[in-house]
Image (cartoon, grey):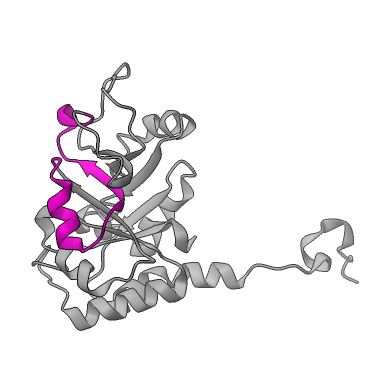
Amino acid sequence: MFNRIAIGTANWGQEYNGTKVDEEEVKKILDYCTCCGINTLDTAEEYGSEEVIGRLANSSFHIVTKGNGDIEKSLDTLDRPGVYGYLWRTPNTFGSFNIMDKAYKTGMSLYDVPDPGQKWMTKPKILQVPYSLMDRRFEHCMEYWHRTGIEIHARSVFLRGKCLEKSTPEECIAFALSNQNVDKVVIGADSSKQLKDNLDFIHKWNKMKCEDEEIIDPRKWKEAK
């Protein structure tokens, strides 16, 4: 499941939600991601984190960044010839010009649920949407989008702390991961320790995997005497 986690970096270059992660902590987060198999970083031109990513993240990380079409500026800041994903902030300008030589996949970061018959100038390859225990507005769209080959990234799984008033971080993340139409769950963290704590349940789940047929095959269960 770790490869379905993406790290949000809104607080890497500036204060976001009351916290700014310093560079030493960013390095620890990146090291943890490398060890666990988390390979996607989510950023945006306005976050101020593209420059931090460009200096500290190695080429094994897939970068998804957002903006309004000035991908050259982002690539220069990221110090990369291209990115995995580039998402438009304004859907009405998506597809107005081709940047496929600079981004493996292009798409949009949506805030409003589109009309059922919505047609875009170009078919998006990625759609990033808010999705959480409290906000399920896009849920009915996800199955259709995913079935047509669109990659779905879920953000705002904590809803800026609102979901944490009634649920744990683990429950919020597990809820988003339980939707098989979601390809990436974007989560931020104030520190590497917080990130590890929030994802510890995945380590526990992974350790529970069993190959012993005496346990997992009910035909081989022995009746207790």
The answer to whether 125 is drawn above or below residue 23 in the figure is above
State the image coordinates of residue 186 (x, y, percent, origin top left). Answer: 32, 55
Q: Quadrant of the C terminus?
A: bottom right
Query: Image quadrant of residue 111?
Result: top left
Farthest residue, direction bottom: 24
Q: Is residue 92 magenta?
A: yes
* 210, 95: nearer the viewer: 95
The answer to whether 52 is drawn above or below residue 97 in the figure is below
**Left-right relation of 201 to 8:** right
| Residue sitting at x 46%, y 63% | 2
* 225, 93: nearer the viewer: 93
State the image coordinates of residue 30 (x, y, percent, origin top left). Answer: 32, 74
Residue 77 visible in the displayed image? yes
**Left-right relation of 156 to 184:** left
Query: Magenta span covers which residues?
Result: 68-95
State the image coordinates of residue 136 (x, y, percent, origin top left). Answer: 32, 38
| Residue sitting at x 17%, y 74% | 21
State the image coordinates of residue 10 (x, y, percent, origin top left). Answer: 17, 61
